[in-house]
Image: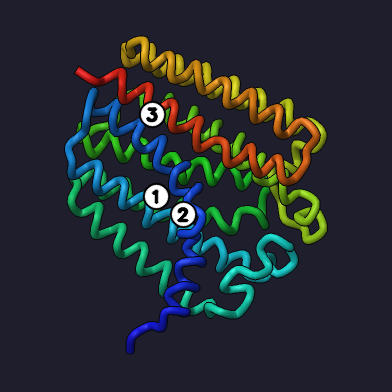
C-alpha cells in the first residue's frame, strides 16, 4: 500500500527535513576531517557516502529523539505539535522509520573499507543512547558531541585505513564546540525543561552558562589552531579559524541577556562558524 502525501509529509517533519540546521552542523566537522585526511579533495565516493550518511543519520537521530521525548515534548510549547506528540505518527511507525534510516546508513558504509564499517557500529550505539541521556545526566550535550563527532575518526579511517594521532585532538575539540552550541540551544528551553525535570548543561551551568560557553569556545579555537599546526596547515587554514572567532564573539553577544529567541539564534549561527572553518581548510589544500 502506498503512503499518502500527508503521511509522507509527517515523516518529512519527523525527520526534521524542514530544518536542515542539524544536518549542516553534523556535515561541517565531517568535511573538515575528510579534507584533512585526504590532504586535498577526497575521493568522490567518500564525499557522497559521508554526505548522504550525515543526512540519513541526522534524520534517524531526530526520529529516535522524538520517540524518546514523546512524553516530554507535549509539555513544551515549541515541540508540542511534533508528529509523534500530536498523534500524526505512531511510536511504532517512528521505530520503523528509525530502523529504515539505520539500514540505509549501513548500506552506504558498505561502500567503504572494513575498518570504517566496524567504526560505524559505535556511531549507531551513540545515536541510539543519546536521546535518553537527558533523563539520567545533566550532560546530554557531551553525548551529542560524541555522536556528532564520531564521523571524524570514520572519515580518517575511510581515507587512510587507520586513525592518525591528530584525530584524538580534533575529535574532543569538536565535542567542545558541540557542547557549547547545544548549551545555547538548551538555554532556549531551560525555563520549560526545569518545569518538567529534563536535564541539560544549561541547567547545571546555571548563572555560569555564558562564561562556561565562552571557555568552551576558547578551548575549541585553540584546539583547532593546534590541529592546523599538527597537519602543517597553511595561511588559509589559520585564517578560517581566525574568522570563526568573530562568530563566537557574536554568539556571546546574542546570549548576553539569556533571551530565549536570541539563544536559539546563537545556536543557528554555528552553521556559519562551521562553514567558514571548512572554507579555510578547503582553500588550504587547493593545489
Q: How crowded is mark 2: few (under 14 residues within 10 Å), some or many (20 or more)?
A: many
User: Badge 1 is on which residue?
Assistant: 123
- Element carrying mark 1: helix
Which callout, 2 or 3, points to the residue nearer the camera?
A: 3
Q: Residue 184 location, x and y as percent?
A: 66, 40
Residue contact at pointers 1 and 3, CB within 8 angstroms = no
- N-terminal of the pair, mark 1 or mark 3, is 1
Marking on residue 127: 2
Taking depth in this image into account, of 255 and 151 the one nearest to the observer is 255
**Left or right, 45 with reference to 259:** left
Is 266 above or below relative to 231? below
Asked where in the image residue 154 lies, by quadrant, the reply is: top left
The residue drawn where x is 36% and y is 36% is 152
Residue contact at pointers 2 and 1, CB within 8 angstroms = yes
**Left or right, 64 with reference to 231:** right
User: CA–CA distance between discs 2 and 1?
Assistant: 6 Å
User: Badge 3 is on which residue?
Assistant: 278
User: CA–CA distance between discs 1 and 3?
Assistant: 22 Å
Taking depth in this image into account, of 233 and 71 the one nearest to the observer is 233
Report the label total: 3
- N-terminal of the pair, mark 2 or mark 3, is 2
Amino acid at each position: 500500500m502506498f503512503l499518502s502525501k500527508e503521511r509522507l509529509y509527517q515523516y518529512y517533519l519527523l525527520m526534521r527535513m524542514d530544518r536542515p540546521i542539524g544536518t549542516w552542523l553534523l556535515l561541517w566537522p565531517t568535511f573538515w576531517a575528510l579534507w584533512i585526511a585526504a590532504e586535498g579533495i577526497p575521493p568522490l565516493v567518500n564525499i557522497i557516502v559521508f554526505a548522504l550518511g550525515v543526512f540519513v543519520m541526522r534524520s534517524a537521530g531526530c526520529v529516535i529523539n522524538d520517540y524518546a521525548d514523546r512524553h516530554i515534548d507535549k509539555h513544551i510549547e515549541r515541540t508540542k505539535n511534533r508528529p509523534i506528540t500530536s498523534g500524526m505518527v505512531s511510536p511504532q511507525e517512528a521505530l520503523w522509520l528509525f530502523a529504515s534510516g539505520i539500514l540505509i546508513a549501513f548500506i552506504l558504509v558498505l561502500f567503504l573499507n572494513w575498518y570504517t564499517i566496524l567504526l560505524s557500529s559505535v556511531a549507531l550505539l551513540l545515536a541510539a543512547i543519546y536521546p535518553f541521556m537527558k533523563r539520567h545526566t545533566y550532560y546530554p550535550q557531551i553525548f551529542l558531541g560524541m555522536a556528532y563527532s564520531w564521523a571524524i575518526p570514520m572519515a580518517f579511517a575511510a581515507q587512510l585505513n587507520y586513525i592518525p594521532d591528530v584525530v584524538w585532538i580534533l575529535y574532543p575539540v569538536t565535542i567542545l564546540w558541540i557542547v557549547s552550541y547545544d548549551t545555547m540551544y538548551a538555554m532556549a528551553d531551560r525555563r520549560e525543561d526545569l518545569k518538567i525535570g529534563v536535564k541539560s548543561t544549561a541547567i547545571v551551568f546555571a548563572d555560569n552558562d555564558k562564561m562556561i560557553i565562552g571557555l568552551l569556545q576558547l578551548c575549541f579555537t585553540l584546539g583547532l589552531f593546534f590541529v592546523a599546526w599538527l597537519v602543517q596547515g597553511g595561511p588559509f587554514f589559520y585564517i578560517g579559524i581566525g574568522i570563526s572567532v568573530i562568530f563566537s564573539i557574536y554568539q556571546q553577544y546574542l546570549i548576553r541577556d539569556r533571551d530565549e529567541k536570541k539563544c536559539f539564534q546563537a545556536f543557528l549561527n554555528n552553521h556559519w562558524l562551521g562553514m567558514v572553518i571548512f572554507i579555510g581548510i578547503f582553500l588550504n589544500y587547493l593545489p
